[in-house]
Image: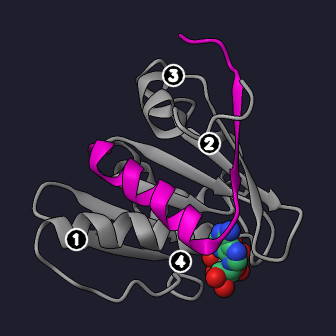
Amino acid sequence: MSADLATTVHLASPEDTAALAQALAPLLQPGDVILLAGQIGAGKTHFARAVIQARLSAAGWQEDVPSPTFTIIQTYHDGAAEICHADLYRLTDADEVFELGLADAFHDAICLVEWPDRLGHHAPGNALRLSFAPGNAADARILTIESSSARWDRVIDRLTAPAIEGR
Ligand SMILES: Nc1ncnc2c1ncn2[C@@H]1O[C@H](COP(=O)(O)OP(=O)(O)OP(=O)(O)O)[C@@H](O)[C@H]1O
Ligand SMILES: [Mg+2]
């Protein structure tokens, strides 16, 4: 277990957010769960889309990645891994994660989950937790990165080495 330290990154633009997502994408493997918190319009889908498109494009595929607002879950396959993109805003009962197959996906797929508070106690303890908050300009965001799993320590170091602001 690693200490539960938070890393803060300043994302000055949507391009900054996409660049961070593109840096994370190749480091992911099945069983990795990324929880994306933040209010409506915070940038959760923007980040997830950039992760998914980076992995698909590394495999030679270009695909639209729509927000799963209405479908709740969208799945992709990049040849190496299944990718599960979920938006749980509309979930009314945390136990629906079983009906949706999300509990299995947490073990077998790379999962990107928006509105993870809806998971209640089903939220995996070994997830990487990203939280987007407003920054000091319309296009700026403050991203807080946290995890309780040693798996993510090196990943976080690699992601934030040039842009680290506090730890
Ligand atoms: N630094 C930034 N990082 C990410 N998105 C940004 C940033 N600055 C501006 N944006 C814009 O904010 C919007 C974020 O929309 P997005 O759909 O990603 O939000 P969301 O957090 O998924 O909201 P919802 O809860 O409705 O699903 C996009 O239009 C994006 O271009
Ligand atoms: Mg969204």
Q: How far apart are marks 4 and 1 (CA)?
A: 20 Å
Q: Determine whether the beta carbon of the residue marked 2 sits less than 8 angstroms from the nearest atom of ligand 1.
A: no
Q: What element carries label 3?
A: loop
Q: Is mark 4 on a helix, strand or loop?
A: loop
On screen, 8 above or below 86? above
Pick whichever, 68 or 167, lies toward us.
167
Q: Would you name the residue on which mark 2 appears? A: 129
- How many other residues sit within 10 Å of disc 2, few (<14), some (14-19) or many (≥20)? many
On screen, 10 above or below 8? below
Q: Would you name the residue on which mark 1 appears? A: 56
Say whether residue 50 is magenta. Answer: no
- Disc nearest the viewer among 4 and 2: 2
Q: Which mark is residue 72?
A: 4
Which residue is most to the right?
A: 136
- How many other residues sit within 10 Å of disc 3, few (<14), some (14-19) or many (≥20)? some
Q: Is mark 2 on a helix, strand or loop?
A: strand
Q: What element carries label 1?
A: helix
Q: How far apart are marks 4 and 2 (CA)?
A: 19 Å
Q: Which mark is residue 149?
A: 3
Q: Distance between the residues labelled 1 and 2?
A: 23 Å
